[in-house]
Image (tube, rainbow, N blue to C red):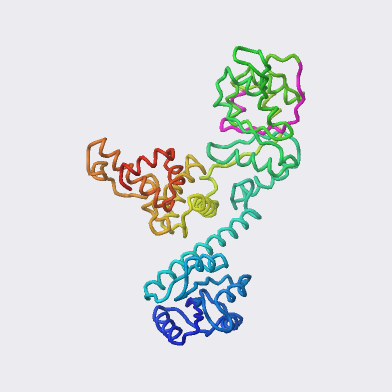
Amino acid sequence: MLQTILVIDDEANMRHMLRVLLTKQGYKVDVAGNGAEGIEWMHRGRYDFVLCDLRMPVMDGMAFLEQIRHNPQETTVIMMSAYGTIDQAIETVKQGAYDYISKPFKLDEILLVLRKAEERERLRRENRQLKERIDAIDGQLAFGGMVGKSKAMQDIFRLAGKVARHHTTVLITGESGTGKELVAKGIHAAGKGSDAPFVAVNCASIPAQLLESEFFGYAKGAFTGADRDKKGLFEEADQGTLFLDEIGELPPDLQVKLLRVLQEGEVRRVGAVKSRKVDVRVLTATNRELPALVEQGVFREDLFYRLNVLNIHIPPLRQRPEDMPLLCHFILHKCAARLGVAIQGIAPAAMELLMQHDWPGNVRELENVLERALILADRNIILPQHLPEQLGGRRERRRIDDVLGTYSLKQAKIIMEKQLIGRAMEATRGNKSKAAQLLELSYPALLAKLKEYEW
């Protein structure tokens, strides 16, 4: 469809010139002699853009802006004037104009402003579509930040939604990267205590000698360095949810104490005399086979049964290929919004490669691949060449010295740094803070690199 422009100007020559020039550029153009006539034209149909003079009889540009301020058409207005000042330009933008251009102007100037306005409208339209798509997903195909239309995932979403209404322990199982913590967060968010704390801890990440004090807290003077009372994780999560990831890594002596907390609903800080009551929903997760650990004597059988009141198993990504397109677009658009870049989608050839991969790292691996592809994409669409080699993105085998043009490690490091910094700056449209986050650099370090490479 042709984009439509309404030109509002009291000078007949200006109206005629703009009609002729813009029609040659492929626009459909209507003209009006003042703001009041412009309002009449806008009642008859929709316009993508309005070029409006500031000084006119009957109704001037500012009065016109005031009249259409709440126009549901969301028309983009560009003001024009031969007598304008900077203050006037600022005031028109405050009143809702997109831009301001001074007369006399060259055709290239007005076309440049229109192209910028078209780009802004395209991004706004994409953002609206993305929001509508995400809202639809949230309403039908999602739970707790996860999306999926496969029967397996729909069953998980329904089960998790039911569980959320009841204060019971849940064991969430599945391979690494499948989204076990997202399910736990979703259960917490959908439950009665959603306003209370959600405390997540990876049992494998805490040194064994610190586990007890981390879980249950300690009293002042309990050991060297305990100069004050400290709450443990159970007290931090009181009235809320405690999510224990990698529960299979919990040492046997702490398994006993965890079982007691679940049975009695109370904790005793290290070095304390009295116990404290806590009301905590405990959700656990593991990528290990707990029944096998029970048979080996590594994990307590009574604790396993206490944790496994209800089990939610998340299948790996390779077992639910029907979720891939929806999941890819959901991740890609959320990533694009975070990075502040535009994205149209994924080319069919690239989607075919994504569908064929086994995804041993599951959704976490997919997120990393899509973020990388988004940074590399030059035309706002993911193509096969933007995907890693293991996915078939680059079919030809090239030697590293062919790619970098050098055998020198020092020179290769410089080349790679410059390329990655350049990509990150392009992806974030020059936003140094976002680029630093993307590169996993501190902001001062990025500034130093930009200066070093004269970016």
Front position in the image: 189 or 293 = 189
Give the answer, above or below, for where 381 lies relative to 65.
above
Q: Would residue 355 be counted in the magenta stretch? A: no
Residue drawn 66% across and 13% down?
A: 222
65 displayed left or right of 453:
right
**In the image shown, does 237 or 141 lie closer to the viewer?**
237
Magenta segment: does it hold 286? yes
Q: Which residues are magenta?
A: 274-294
> In front here: 27 or 183?
27
Q: Considering only vertical position in the picture, is 377 above or below 207?
A: below
Position of 154 with respect to 354 (left or right) is: right
The residue lying at 49 percent from left, 82 percent from top is: 9
In the image, taking residue 276 as reference, residue 107 lies left or right, namely left
Above or below 126: residue 215: above
- Give the number of callouts: 0
Residue at image position (43%, 40%) is 443
Q: Position of residue 163 (x, y in %)?
A: 72, 41
Of 385 and 334, nearer the camera is: 334
Q: Residue at x 54, y 54 (%)?
A: 326
State the image quarter where residue 296 is shown: top right
Image x and y of residue 89, in percent: 49, 67
x, y percent for residue 266: 75, 23
